[in-house]
Amino acid sequence: MADLIDDIIGIVGTTGVLTGADVAARPASWLRPEPSRAKAIVRPASTEETAAVMKLCHAAGQVVIPVGGNTGLVEGATGGPDDILLSLERMNAIESLDETGCTMTVQAGVPLHTVQERAADADLMFPVDFGARGSAQIGGAISTNAGGNAVIRYGMMREQVLGLEAVLADGTVVSSMNRLLKNNAGYDLKQLFIGTEGTLGIITRAVLRLRPALRSRNTAFVAIDDYTNVPSLLKRLGSSLGGSLTAFEVLWEDFYNTVVVERDRHAPPVEAGHPWYVLIEARGGKQEEDAEQFQAALEEALDAGLIVDAAFASGAKQREAMWAIRDDIDGLAEILDPVMAFDVSLPIVHTADYVAAVKKRLNERWPETFRGTSFGHLGDNNLHFLLTVGSSDHDEQRKVMDIIYDELKPYRGSISAEHGIGLEKRAYLNVTRNETEVALMRSLKQALDPQGLLNPGRIF
């Protein structure tokens, strides 16, 4: 196997391969900070180098695990001692930006925040946004079909990708770098690689769809005492704001108390003691007019009894402080150590009942050690749990997963709203997908990677 590494070095150079202590210096994953155990981390600098590396690995029967910014939550990019991790961190160039056509062509290793900033420089915007924007890479975000804070208005990553380029397990390069909004000529091949977690191919480049920059941004933090008012408020705002509603982030009281009250990490925008809080944001084209419309919409909701308290961000500083509460996942993980993270999807009307049922069972099973928080992008059906039962034992954590996903079945929800399946959720795929669907997935995997060398064991 040393010969294989030497041959790979011949392709990517000595700086393109990390081994030994350099591998161990990197964490296995965001949720597992222990040292990575991979045989090597290979870092090609181009699609051509990636293809050449894959040809060598294919001939040698070597397992390859694509890794992006390593911010995933389902062990989708964790390698073992016999695995090669393939990182596109050196492929981090923005190749072109078409201001007229509103597209950006990027390499897969570009961080999300870099794309956002470059778009903003051209008076455009890239709408996908989430807390790990500084380290998450575009290739990983596409491979997992990432969602984030603005899905309710702009959709998930899939809706932002016009074309892409990928390298198959045998080194074949599939280049479908479409720049057109409408292209109905045959199969849309990029969909084979979006959301498939690197199991069918390694994304190396992409054409991203940009949007015109928005001139106004209005944000509020509100409190709600009756959960039935949460979906009612969402519907009312969707209508009264004329399509400008961009974010609708719901926080349960346990989240607010943990982050804002108990640890005094943030200044409270509204008083504690309410069962639900919602971070609301609308973006449009005229700040003064939009601000009036936004405030009027929320005042109407107050008058109607849908919300009981509200704080409006008077400027960027207050807006950032509100978002800092929602984005303080690192703080939650520190408090809830050893933490478990869940990402599910179900109809918003049933979410409160589902959360209550899950917490009841977890409290009954671990009355002394269970502690959890609930929050999410409920405007697009996405709910997150961050919780602990005081143990990192695999069997104990498996019992937690059994409860989380068993309670999801009556609502025909999804075990993964935006983070993928990885290794962590594969045993529960049948909760969300039927036998025919899984069989077709396996057929696609067999067709594109018959040796099972790309990210094996993920999804199923």
Image (cartoon, grey):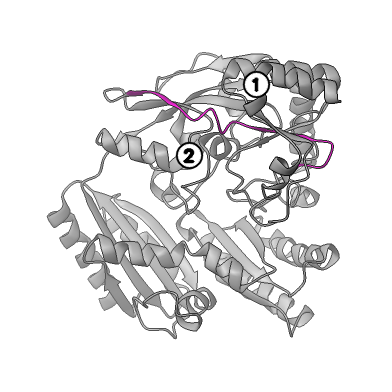
| Image quarter of the C terminus | top right
Badge number at residue 111: 2
**Residue 248 image position (x, y, % from top left):** 40, 60
Q: Quadrant of residue 322?
A: bottom left
Query: How packed is label 2: few (under 14 Cα within 10 Å), some, or many (20 or more)?
Result: many
> Does residue 70 appear anywhere in the picture?
yes
Residue at 48% x, 39% y is 111
| Image quarter of the N terminus | top right
Q: Nearer the viewer, residue 83 or 161?
A: 83
Disc 1 target residue: 13
Q: Is 285 contained in the magenta span?
A: no
> Does residue 187 appear anywhere in the picture?
no
Residue 141, compared with residue 340, is above or below; it is above
Residue 218, compared with residue 459, is above or below; it is below
**Which label lies toward us, 1 or 2?**
1
Residue 340, compared with residue 92, is above or below; it is below
